[in-house]
Structure formats: structure tokens, C-alpha cells
Amino acid sequence: MSFLSLMAATLPECALLVKLFYESKGNAAAALREFRRLKNLRKGPLLPQALKRMIAEFEKTGHLGVQPGRGRKSTSSDVVEDVATAIVDQSMDNIIGCSSVRAVSRHLGVLYSTVWNVLRKVEHFFPYKIRHNQQLMANDREKRLTFALTFLARVKVDASWPWKILWSDEAHFHLSGTVNTHNCRIWDTESPRAFQEIPLHSPKVTVWCGFTATFILGPLFFEETTRNGPVTCTVTARRYKNMLENFEAPQMLQHQCLDSITFMQDGALPQIGLCVQQFLRQHFTNDRVNSRAFPTAWPPRTPDLNPCDFWMWGYLKNLVYRGRLITLADLKDSITLHVRSISVDQLRSAVEQTLHRLQILHLEEGNHIEQHSLHR
């Protein structure tokens, strides 16, 4: 039974009730009184006994019980993956951070209408590459607020839980030092006029890292071996699953935490391919994955909550590009050196900052939070 079947309330209101219950030290009646006060209600939305059943379900599953993807029809995985990787590659290489349907059609050698139909079905999986301006869409605030409230409520249940989350992400590092606006955004009171000239096809590496409050995994570079040496390749579902199977999972076993860690990813299309979903459910179960296509979905257009985005990638690029980089091998060596020099204090601080941001997000009711002073 899901929370929403217990009362006529929105998902953020369900999450707020859970949070108020813990703040009231388990007093269901007090939590309901505070909820009615905040919402200016005379009665409802449920009895204290029903709220306690809701809390019991939350403590058992760790999420709000709403299954993802309800009503969503599947799309041909091969075509979707080809279109997805082409969109990501071209948007990252384009100075304005986007790509066109016609360009993808020519690149793949498929019909324009085929690409357009695929994008119509899966465009919501591209929160950064297609809509590069980070503007929140109609339902984004509700999803962000629900995520924040649910996360903070889980912290009330288990204060050590945030320290057992593996935050993960991938990023491009260009040899030319090009900065992607996905990781570096400009905030100003007026329309910014900053621009940067870049080579059309700048050599780059694609790197994955993951970290908890106590250790960091990586860097791992997505590349294939050719006669001329390693070549950077596009992240696809198959390659991502192979990375998890051959690198991430063995590393977690070495740290003796594969059975207890919660795995977080932002839910880009290659990260939720069927083969990836099967692997994650096998090793982490549904309840220990924070990602799209799982019960606890990472909210869209939310780099301001991911410590990889708001801290790690910017921090690393600031260090990596200080040195002289001539070849991709130099770039990879520099990335590896600086990743391995990150201290436990820095990792813990990043997790603490994530919790701080979630609290601000709650106060801002799901809106952007980067305009606030976020450094304590």
C-alpha cells in the first residue's frame, strides 16, 4: 500500500508529514496538528493511526512507495541509446550546449523522423543536454521538494545513512581546458555576456568517480583500446554496466560495504538501461539505489544537490588545468593525481554541504538554491 492510497494529498505533503512526525519525536497527533497549521486546514488529512502505518511503511522501505515509470511505454533500446549518446556528445562539444535533430540524424545515418520520434519519447531523460539552461519545468519543484523532504526524513530515522551513500557521476575533461556550463554556471543580476572560444572537436577524456564521506572510487576513464592506443568512447548502457561490474562493485567489496551502501546516480539515459537496472537491483536492491527508474528517483535538473556537480568536478578542474597539459595522457595523469589527493575531511564536508542544501531546498519549496550563500 502506498502513502497516496492513505489520503488525498500530494506527494510533497506526504513527505512533509513524515518529516513532521520525526520532528515531533514520534507523536502522530502533534505532527498532524502542525501539518494542519502549516496548510491552514481545519481537519484531516488522516487519523494518527493511519500516519503511524505510513511511518512504518516508510521505515521499512525508505521511500514513499510510488513505483516509477507507471504508464510509460518502453522504447527500442538500441535506437534510444544511439540517439542519446549522439545528443550528449554533440551538446558537450557545442559551445552553446545543445544539438539539433538534423545533426544527429546525419551523424547516425537514420531518418530525421526516427530521431524526432525517439526524442519525443525520451527527451525528459536529458535534463542538461537538451535543456541546458537549468530552467525548472512545471513539475520539477514538486519533485525536488519531495526528494528533499524524504531524504531529510530518512536522516531522522538513521543519522548515519548520508555517510553511507556513494555519490557518483561522469564528466568530460577537455585537453584545451574547455569548461562545460553543466559544471560551471554563471549567476548574475543581468544577462551574462561571457563566452569562450573552443576548438570544434577538442580532444577529451570521459571520467567517472564516486565517493562517500570516507573514501573515493576512481577515476575510471571510458575508453577503448585500439592499435593507436586508448581512445575516449561514449558512455553507453553496456559500457556503464561493464564499469559497474568490473570496477565499481569489486572496489566496494574491497571496502566491505557493497551490502550496506546506497548508490546514487543522476539517471542519465545510459545509466538506466535495462542491463544497468538489472545489475543495480541485483547488487543494491531497489531500496538502496537513488536514481531514475527506481523507487527513490533523483529529481531532474538538480545539479545543485549533487556534490559531484556543485563541488568535485569544479574543484578538480581548477587544479587539473593549472598544470601544463600537452597530451591526453598528461590530462589523465593529472586527473588521477588530484582525485587521489582528495582528503577524507573534504569528502565529509561535501556530504555535510549536501545536507545543508537539502534543508535550504525545503525552505525554498523546491526552487533553485544557488542564489543563496551556501557556504557555512
Image: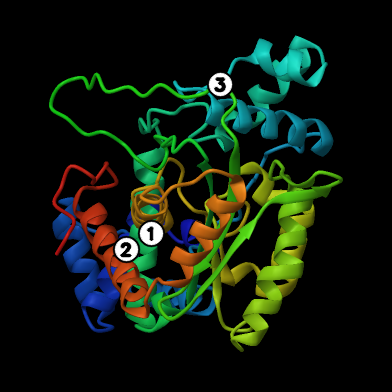
Q: Residue at x 22, y 61 (%)?
A: 35
* Image quarter of residue 54: bottom left
* Marks 1 and 2 close (CB-CB < 8 Å): yes
Q: Tell me which amino acid carries mark 3.
A: Leu
Q: Give the left or right position of residue 58, taking residue 273 as reference.
A: left
Alpha carbons under labels 1 and 2: distance apart: 6 Å
Q: Which residue is mark 2?
A: 354
List the residue tagged with mark 3.
200
Mark found first going from the N terminus, 1 or 2: 1
Residue 357 shown left or right of residue 92 in the figure: left
| Relative image position of residue 119 (x, y in whole percent) | 66, 24
Query: Is residue 375 at all visible to an observer of this figure?
Result: yes
Q: Amino acid at mark 1?
A: Pro
- Determine the residue located farthest toward the right in the rendered image: 227
Disc 1 versus disc 2: nearer the observer: 1
Dot 3 crowding, Cα within 10 Å, few <14, some 14–19, many 20+: few
Residue furthest to the bottom in view is 256
Mark 3 or 2, closer to the camera: 3
Q: Secondary structure at mark 3?
A: loop
Total marks placed: 3
List the residue tagged with mark 1.
Answer: 307
Rendered-image quadrant of the N terminus: bottom right
Q: Quadrant location of residue 208?
A: bottom right
